[in-house]
Image: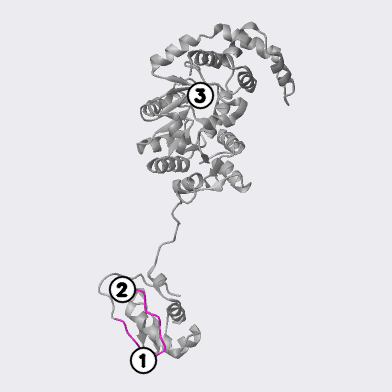
């Protein structure tokens, strides 16, 4: 990247507001150095003026040009670059080796450049990245989930991108930093400005282990509009966005909208239906704009490679009864919990043969499920004995001449008793 291009873009970042589409189109049309000269001379290229008149919402170019001209007179690109160097920050622009090419999808609103502060390579970090966003006034539930997502994503080698705000953002950053994985903090102010001030130590840790990103020159303080404009970068830098908590009116939903426009994966974490801080997430899910995720692994499956980042299938706890074959389960279901009944009645109720019933009853008795009583068979009561647990599957009952075929009970283990029914 030649110095003239870098200097021109540094100047234009002082001249135009972040995300100014008109400036973006001017730079795309003429190049950054020529755009600076046009603004200095207060004369825009005629074909550009014609092009802008065809826009759906054409800007007032005379007014815009006048504002740019005044700002350019006050801009000092040399001083900005010197300040950045003194701080340890660097300016990257399109074409730089560290420039994330996915930002090109922003079109005319693509940033003119990005100021970075931190040792991590931004482009490389964003190859496997997830944006974790949510409410500033997050609930304890939201903070816990955000930290768990940050930690889980980081442990699997995924970079977390967020905005460094209080609440969900801060919890997600802290979670991923705890895993010794880089995090990307996208600010709505200069990289040398700690906003919010309470996150000064968090930003310091991010500068050591990750990277601070901003399209604002050093020393610029945040405004309300810059936060919303900043959100498009959070969505664009990551492969997918997960909304942990969001009210119906939330900046996190603005980031979600940018993710949808950019055709990025969008996910939402469900919360209590009584919590207004989860109402925005629930609306995204109800309108089928977002995928429901409840673990970092599920988010990785959503944004990862097909077949290579599958989340483990959630299963209920295994119980010894799961190991019984179908015939044995039928026999067990037919055994009464009180009194007792004979094998013939059990066989009739279970719908299996008498020989198979006798074989199954023997195995169930050995495993501690049933017991023989005066009236026949009944379920063994938990209070009367400790049921033994067997790791072996009971054999399929077979039709044989046999009376009761008993299995030797195992020597170790305890089997939880069946509830009285």
The residue at the far front in this view is 2
Tell me where residue 89 sits by quadrant: top left
**Residue that badge 3 annotates:** 95
Dot in front, 1 or 2: 1
Tell me where residue 400 sits by quadrant: bottom left
The circle on residue 200 is none
Residue found 72% across the figure and 24% down from its top: 55
Residue found 42% across the figure and 86% down from its top: 356
The circle on residue 403 is 1
Between residues 128 and 213, which one lies in front from this camera angle? Answer: 128
Dot in front, 3 or 1: 3
x, y (%) of residue 114? Answer: 49, 23
Q: Which residues are magenta?
A: 391-407
Judge left or right: residue 107 versus residue 142. right
User: At numbered mark 2, what does the secondary structure look like: helix, strand or loop?
Assistant: loop
x, y (%) of residue 402? Answer: 36, 91
**Residue that badge 2 annotates:** 388
Q: Is residue 167 visible?
A: no
Judge left or right: residue 66 versus residue 376. right
Q: How would you classify the magenta stretch by its main secondary structure?
A: loop
How many angstroms separate mark 3 from mark 1 (CA)?
Answer: 84 Å
Between residues 311 and 319, which one lies in front from this camera angle? Answer: 311
User: At numbered mark 3, what does the secondary structure look like: helix, strand or loop?
Assistant: loop
């Amino acid at each position: 990247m030649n110095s003239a291009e870098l200097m021109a873009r540094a100047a234009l970042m002082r001249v135009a507001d972040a995300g100014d589409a008109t400036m973006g189109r001017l730079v795309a049309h003429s190049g950054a150095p020529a755009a600076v000269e046009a603004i200095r001379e207060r004369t825009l290229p005629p074909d550009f003026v014609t092009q802008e008149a065809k826009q759906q919402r054409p800007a007032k170019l005379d007014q815009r040009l006048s504002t740019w001209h005044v700002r350019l007179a006050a801009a000092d690109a040399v001083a900005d670059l010197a300040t950045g160097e003194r701080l340890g920050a660097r300016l990257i622009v399109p074409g730089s080796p560290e420039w994330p090419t996915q930002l090109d999808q922003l079109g005319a609103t693509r940033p003119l450049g990005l100021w970075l502060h931190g040792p991590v390579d931004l482009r490389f970090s964003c190859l496997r990245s997830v944006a974790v966003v949510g409410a500033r006034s997050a609930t304890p539930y939201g903070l816990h989930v955000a930290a768990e997502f940050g930690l889980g994503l980081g442990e699997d080698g995924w970079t977390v991108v967020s905005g460094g705000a209080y609440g969900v953002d801060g919890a997600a950053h802290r979670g991923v930093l705890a895993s010794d994985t880089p995090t990307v903090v996208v600010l709505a102010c200069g990289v040398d400005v700690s906003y919010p001030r309470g996150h000064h130590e968090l930003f310091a840790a991010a500068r050591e282990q990750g990277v601070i990103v901003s399209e604002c020159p050093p020393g610029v303080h945040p405004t309300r509009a810059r936060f919303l404009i900043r959100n498009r970068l959070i969505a664009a830098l990551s492969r997918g966005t997960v909304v942990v908590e969001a009210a119906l009116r939330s900046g996190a939903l603005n980031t979600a909208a940018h993710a949808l426009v950019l055709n990025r994966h969008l996910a939402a974490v469900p919360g209590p239906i009584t919590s207004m801080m989860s109402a925005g997430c629930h609306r995204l899910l109800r309108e089928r704009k977002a995928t429901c995720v409840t673990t970092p692994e599920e988010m990785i499956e959503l944004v990862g490679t097909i077949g290579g980042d599958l989340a483990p299938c959630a299963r209920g706890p295994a119980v010894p009864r799961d190991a019984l074959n179908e015939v044995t389960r039928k026999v067990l279901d037919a055994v009464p919990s009180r009194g007792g009944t004979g094998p013939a009645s059990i066989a009739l109720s279970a719908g299996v043969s008498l020989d198979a019933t006798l074989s199954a009853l023997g195995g169930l008795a050995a495993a501690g499920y049933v017991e023989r009583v005066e009236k026949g068979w009944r379920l063994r009561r938990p209070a009367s004995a400790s049921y033994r647990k067997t790791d072996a599957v009971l054999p399929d009952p077979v039709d044989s001449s046999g009376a009761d075929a008993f299995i030797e009970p195992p020597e170790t283990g305890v089997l939880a008793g069946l509830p009285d029914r």
